[in-house]
Amino acid sequence: MKRNKDKQKRAIYSAAAIVLCAAALGSFWLTNKNPEKENTESKSESSQVITTEAQPQVNVPVTNVPDDRETEPTKPSSCYFALPSENNITKHYSGTELVKNTTTDDWRAHTGLDIAGKVGDPIKVICDGTVTDVHDSELWGTTVTVDHGNGISSEYRGLGRGSTPEVGAQVKINDKIGNLGEIPVEKADGVHLHLEICENGKNIDPEKVIGTNYEFKN
């Protein structure tokens, strides 16, 4: 009888110990579960913040950067044109009106301005430019063409052979463009310079340009 009571007591003690162990394990599991979750969430949030900061910014204007793009230089709207010679004008520009040519004994438009002189007189370029043509003509003697830019060019007829600059030469206003020679097709009018001025390929009256700050049309 006493042995049975001892067995019962041992069984009760064993059961109580098992319950206590189970309770302790459960408490330990609950205690450590939430911190792990919090640590995991904290790490996740930190990763998200780092990822967001590392993303490149889009459509953000760049400032304080110098603009080194080349721009086309502005062309002047006008330029002063000087006389090629101080001598007297002997024949004016006639435009479309026909005038008598005493050398050829016919009527034709006079497309330039004639300025008297003598063989060997220096002739000056009327404005800065580039020599684009030099040639000898049986009718007009040696002829030089200068491009002044902005569609304006000047042509000097009746110069002496070998007295002119070469094609491509850069000339400045009042530089010598050549010495006077003869003009066979206008020989009856005496030694003179025949000056023509063109704007965009069309002859214009030189007297509207010479001695003025001519306003360019283009």
Image: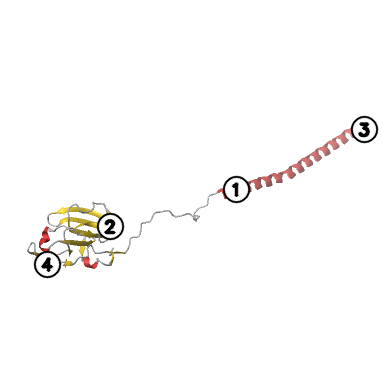
Around disc 1, counting alpha carbons within 10 Å, would you say few (fewer than 14), some (14 to 19), or many (20 or more)?
A: few
Return the disc, 1 or 3, that comes first in the chain's sequence: 3
User: Which residue does the numbered mark 2 point to in the structure image?
Assistant: 129
- Contact, mark 4 vs mark 1 (Cβ under 8 Å): no
Disc 3 vs disc 2: which is toward the camera? 2
Q: Quadrant of residue 39?
A: top right
Q: Are marks 3 and 2 in contact (CB under 8 Å)?
A: no
Q: Is residue 93 above or below residue 162?
A: below
Amino acid type at image mark 1: Ile
Secondary element type, mark 4: strand
Name the foreground residue: 106 vs 48: 106
The relative height of residue 212 versus residue 163 in the rendered view (above or below) is below
Image quadrant holding the N terminus, namely top right
Q: Earlier in the sequence, mark 3 or mark 2?
A: 3
Residue 50 is marked as 1
| Disc 2 versus disc 1: nearer the observer | 2
Query: Hey, what amino acid is under mark 3?
Result: Lys
Q: Are marks 1 and 3 in contact (CB under 8 Å)?
A: no
Report if the CB atoms under discs 2 and 1 are less than 8 Å apart: no
Q: Which residue is mark 4?
A: 99
Q: Looking at the rendered structure, which numbered label has been put on residue 2?
A: 3
Label 3, label 2: how far apart the Cα atoms are = 139 Å
Among the 4 quarters of the image, the one containing residue 212: bottom left
